[in-house]
Structure formats: C-alpha cells, structure tokens
Image (spheres, helix red, strand yellow):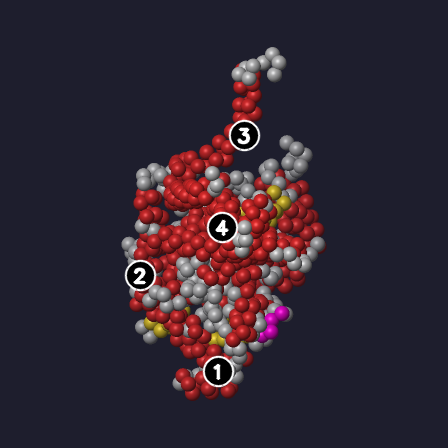
Amino acid sequence: MAGKSPQSPTSNRLPVLLITPLQILLTFILVFPFGLAIYLSFTNWSPLQGIPWWKANLAGVSNFVDMFGDARLWNAVMRTLLIVVVSVSIELGIGLGLALLFFNWQFPLKKVLISMFLIPMMILPIVAGYNFYVLFFEDGPANQFLSFLTGTTQKILWLSDSNLVLFPIMLADIWQWTPFMFLVFYSALHALPAEPFKAARVLGAKSFQIARDLTIPMLKPIMTIAVLIRSLEAFKIFDVPFIMTGGGPGFASETFSIYMMKQGLQFWRISYVSAIALIILTIISVLTWYSAQSLLRGVQKAAPA
Amino acid sequence: MSAEKGVSRRKFLASAAGSAVVAAGAGFGAGVSFAPKEERQIIVPSLQMRPGPGVSPDERALFEAAKIARDSPVRKLSVLIPDGSVPQWEFAKEPWKNFVGVDIELIPTPYLEASVKAIAEAVSKSGAYDIILSSYPFTPDYSEAGLAADIGPLVTKYGAGLDEWPCAMFPPFLKMSKYKGSYRGLINDGDVWHLYLRKDLLEDPQYKQKFKDKYGYALDYPNTWKELNDQIEFFDNTGAGVRGGWFFRERYFFIFEWLMRFVSKGGVLFDDQMKAKINSREGVEALTEMNAVNQYMDASTVSGSYTELYTDAPAGKVYAGMAWGSLGRVLAGEGSQVRGKMTTAPIPGSIVDGKLIRAACFVDGFGVTVSNYSKNLDLAYLLVQYMQSPAVSGKSISIPGFLDAFRECHLTIPGLADTYPHNFIPASKANIDASIPDVMLKGITEYRDIANKNFQLSASGQLTVQDALNRTGEEWDKITERQGMQLQLQQWNYLKTAYPDDVRALHGW
C-alpha cells in the first residue's frame, strides 16, 4: 500500500482491465444472441427463404399474435408443466425420504448403496430414454412383470396409448433425477448444526417431531434451490420423450422442447421460435423469481431472530 | 504453368487411360466403362446393347473432371451422405482419385438428420459439402434456401444420358429429380414402396379354402386395398401364428399408406387454388380403411418405426408388410427366418370407374444435390454424373445399402433378383410405373408432421376420421399461405406431371 492510495488511477484501472475480456466474451455469447432473438422475433425469416437473416422482412408483432392462438404450443407448455409438477414433487419426496433414512440409519453396505443410487444420474438422458422405451414396449419387461404378478397376459400400450404415455416418461425422469435430490439433501443434512438436534432429544422430542419441526425447516433453503434447479431442468425435458415417443402418439407427449425443436429445426420457423422463446423466458423468469422470493420469505420468517 | 498442368491432351489421355487400366486391374473396373467387356457384362449387360461408338456418361464425367481438376486448386470433394449408403459410394473413391486426382470425402450422417445439416449449410454457406445426398422431397426446401444448384445446364453440357436407352432412369424418377421443372436433385435411389407377403401362407391350400369360404373369393395377390384388408384380418385370426401385418402407424411414415389409398381412389391433394382437398370422400375412405385394420397389428406400428418392421418381418411375426426394397433384401437375407418364404406384390389399388388405379408412393428415395456453395460446381456435378451413370450406379445398387434400382437396366443385373424375395423384379417394375411423389413442396416436414399427428389421433379414436382430415387440411392451408401460395401452386402443377398416366387421365391433367 505504500505510496499509493486506494483511490489511485492505477488501482481503479486494474480491475476494469482484468474483467474487460470477460465482459467482451459475455457480450458475444449472451448479449448478441439475445439481441438477435429479439430482432428475429419481429421478422418472418426462415432459412428456406434463401436470404440472410439481416435482410429479413419485418413482420411487426405477428409472431407474438400467432403464438397466442397456437393451441399446439400451449398444450405442449401445459403438458410440460404437468410433467414438472408431478415428477419434481415425487423426486423431492423420495429424495428427501431416502436422505433422512440414510442419514439417521446405520446399516451394512450403506456406502455401496449410496454409490449405486447415484448411477442413474450419471447416465445420459438419451440412454435412459432408450432403456425405458425398451422397458415399456408392448412385449417389454414392464408388461411381462405385470403379467407375472396378475397371472394373465398384460399388453398395456404404455407408449401408444395417449392416456398412458406420460406415465413412463415421468417415471424415467423420476428414476433418473431422484438421486440428484437425494444427493443434495444427504449432503445438506451433514451440514446442519448438531446442537438443536441434541437439545430436542434432551427435551424428549420424537424422531418424527424432530424431522417435522427441525430438519425440514432447516432444509428449506436448500429445498428451494433444489426444486428450482430441477423444475427448470425438467421444463426443458427433451431426450427422454423424444426417444421414447417422439412426442406421440399424436401430440400426447409433445413437450415444450420437442415442440420448439420441430418448429425451429424441422419446420424452420426461426422467427416464430424466437418470439416464443422470448415470451416463455419472460414467463419462466417471473415465475421463478416469484417462487424463489416467496419461498425465501417463508424461510426468513421461520428462521430464529 | 506447372509441368503437371502443361501436359498435352494426348499425354493426358494416355496417362488417364493408364490409370483406368490400373483401376480396373485393382478390381474397380467391374462397374465402370473402362473395364474389360467380360467384367462389365456382369454388372450391366444391357450396356452392351447401346448403339453407336460414343463414350458413356461415366467416361465423359471422368475425362471432363480430370480436365477441370488440372486447372483447379480443389483436391477434395465432400459428400454429405446417409450412413446406410456409404458402402454404395465408397467403392468409387479410388478410381475417381486415380483418374481425376481429386479425393472424395464421405461425411456420413443419420438419414433423418441429413436435411437439417443441409439447411444449416444453406445458412452458413461454408462450402462444407459439395454434394448432398438426402431424401428427394427436401429438394424444394434446398432450392428455395439457395443451396441446390440448378444442374440442368450441366446435365446437357456434359451429357448425363439420364434418359438414354437402354438404361434410362425410370420416367417418374426423372420427373421427381426436378423442382418446378429444373434439375435440382437427381434421384439416386428408387425407393418406391413394395408390398411383401408370406408366400408360404398365401399359397397354403388350407388357408386358400378357408379364405374363400369366409370372403367368397380366391386368396391371391391383393389387387385392391379391400382385398389386402381382408387378408390382414384373415391371417391375424386364422391361427397361423402371425399378426395380420406391420404397416406404418407411427410418427414419420403414417401418411404414405394413406396417400397411396387416397390417390388410388381418385383423391387430389390440392385444388387449383392450392387449397387442401384431403378431407374429401376419398380421404375419409382411405383413413377409415386404414383404421379398420389397426386391430390386427402390433402396437409397435404406432410406437416403433421401421426398425421394428425390419425386426418383426424377418422374424416371421407378420403376414404382410409394406416398405422399401431394402426390406426385401433383409427378408431374403441370411439372418431372415422367412428366407424363401416371402413374395413381393404390386401395391394394391382401387377400382375407379371400373378401372383398377394403383398408386405406389416413392418414399424418401435419395436425391443428389450439388451445392451452390461448392468449391467447384462443375467438378462436383461431374462426380454426381459419374455416380449416376448406368455402369457405376449399377455397381452401387448391387452393394447392400439404402440405395435401390432407379434405372431400367438395374432390374436386369444378373443375380440381383436372388437378393430379394420371390417376384421382386416384376412387382418392383409395376410399383415404379405406378409411383407417386411425396407431398414434395417447400416446407414438406410440416405438411407431413401435422398429417401424421392427426392421423394417429384418428387411429386411437381421439379424433374422428373427418375431424382429423379437416384439421390437417386447415393446417395445410396455413402452411401453404406461410410458404407462399403462388410458389407452392407452381410446384404442385409441376408435381401433377409426375403422377402415373392412369391418375393423370382420371383428372384430365
């Protein structure tokens, strides 16, 4: 510090110089594509027109108007939200339950089991999708198992019945991502302070009461983060339904990502897809922010002063 | 001028001929015109009947390409090619390199992804691919995107001999090689659909008698769709240990059987103002007939795709199946449990005004597109002409892979019939003669997708047949409007010329 004050020009310039390359990089990888998406959403450009995107005809707000009348789009969004709500809730419940079980219960081969639980998470979603496709095929193991249990031949059309098709897709998601929840909660449990639990036991609290009144409230911040991360990930679900059903039969398992892929990379409606992406990004951002805020407010209220 | 570039024409031809001899000696010559006559006879005997002394299209392509390559810095031509077709182009790399001095780089891709990569190239204009081999219905997309070069002038300039007797390309394939009347994607693969039936069951006297007792007419090759429906129902319920059939009811190919039934009944896809007419009586009948036999098929026809067909049919699990020539090769292949038990039939038709009208869909056959962004358009085109020529293409389609016969002389290649089920060659000829194009318009994927989705909903009972067709028609009109009505109308008017004579006569086209 000798000879230079904290406000000297040199010390002011250095941080700016250090972060400039990163800022330039971010400008290119974030700002430019985002700006391009905004521009394209107000045009009617498609690669099939044979003109470069910067020469596209302006289309005003027609893409935004079109999307609000696009039943296929909103059905895909609602279908995806259904998958998110059901899958993430079950993943949360099972993940938390298993974490509490493993944390509180000592038994042989515990470490081996923990390692095994994590395997699904490490499998590529596309492989998981194929595995579940084979599992739920008409003559696949799922129906064979049900036939064994019931004693009669079961030919449940898991993948070709519109009313059933979301079940194997959600099951695949739950199978693959419950370990993530388990891992997060199991780690978080180890990080909780021991004193409140000791005090509770001294005061005669039962295990259930400790879990309800201490463990879960103390885990709420991490639960909030885990649910948010998983919900955002689950909303982007693509590989599993694409491999298992391609979005069919009909539109029965067409998720938002599959819809976007088709519109963008098969039908080449790039401007339309840009408009949808912007609107969905806005909606998801607002919902995420609101959910995070309300959950964190709850946590702050519950926390001891 | 370098010493290499400065060689005289005589020296060049002498060295070129020497290269050809070396190439022929290396085993390549069996398929090209420089090879000894005896070897050429094995591959394309009909070439021996060619009148006059002139050189063949492959010879012209090699000589012209070698001339161009002398003055060009281009030392490699890149070809985007569906992975299943690689062996069918691979053999040509060495002779082309030896003669022309230019490498061929084959860039394999899953065939359903080829169009995506091609359009990406249309945007980036990188010159990554000189030639693109992909499904012909995408030719309008490639053309409008600025990717597909108009190679009509080059076809004339270098004498491709596409319609030269006795090894002309089948006329429908010549028509489908064009977009709005100009050559943009030469058909390199005669992928018309065929009907495959279990010959042992079809000819079984017991089944013949039972069938006649039940339906009142003889069990034979089905001439009409109704007869095929009867056979599917019969064999699913007759204790033969097979399902009635495996016909596409899945996400990509559902539309094609409907299209064949629809056209054979006299249906027309669009009117003169380019409004969809698919919700007509013919459309309803076609889809209703299809849905009627769904109960006699495995659920994998909905949830699976051609891989399930290519597994179930050779395993002897189905009586009937409909697909490309490649399925025939699988059925007649060594691993097939029904080898020698299958037969090939013409695609059934419908009786209209007392006449049997057949329509066999030409589904996803590969066309060869020369990229406008090629480093050397003429050189790239000449490789296409070389591969397209009677001699080289004869060798190409003799190698197992995606590519099937697309020239008349291909069907006479000795030994070829043995690699397919019984009756393949006559049935194949009948189906090619009756072939109809896909909905070969700009935005093809979207037209197909919405039809497949709505047809699936009708198959599962979630939509009535009429509603499925109404919705599809409405969506098609929107797509047409978005893509440009006049543009689509121009191509539709051209496509009408690619329909079989019977169909054109029916509509006065």
Tell me the residue that label 4 is attached to: A213
Chain bearing mark 2? B
Which amino acid, mark 3? Leu
Task: Please say if B217 is above or below A32.
Answer: below
Task: Please say if A273 is above or below B347.
Answer: above
Chain bearing mark 3? A
Image coords of residue B343 (percent x, y) = 53, 74
Q: SS of the residue at dot 3? A: helix
Instruction: Using the numbered discs, state the Cα–Cα distance from disc 1 to disc 4 in whole angstroms.
Output: 67 Å
> Mark 3 packing: few (<14 Cα in 10 Å), some, or many (20+)?
few
Which amino acid, mark 1? Thr
Left or right of B496 in this view: B95: right
Same chain, marks 1 and 2? yes
Tell me the residue that label 3 is attached to: A22
Which amino acid, mark 2? Asn
> Mark 4 packing: few (<14 Cα in 10 Å), some, or many (20+)?
few
Tell me the residue that label 1 is attached to: B238
Q: SS of the residue at dot 4? A: helix
Instruction: Using the numbered discs, state the Cα–Cα distance from disc 2 to disc 4 in whole angstroms.
Output: 59 Å
Instruction: Using the numbered discs, state the Cα–Cα distance from disc 1 to disc 2 in whole angstroms.
Output: 37 Å
Label whose residue precedes the other's in the sequence (3 or 4): 3
Tell me the residue that label 2 is attached to: B470
Task: Look at the image and give the residue range highlighted in magenta.
Answer: B335-339
Determine contact: label 2, label 3, CB under 8 Å.
no
Magenta span includes B336? yes
Image coords of residue A72 (percent x, y) = 37, 54
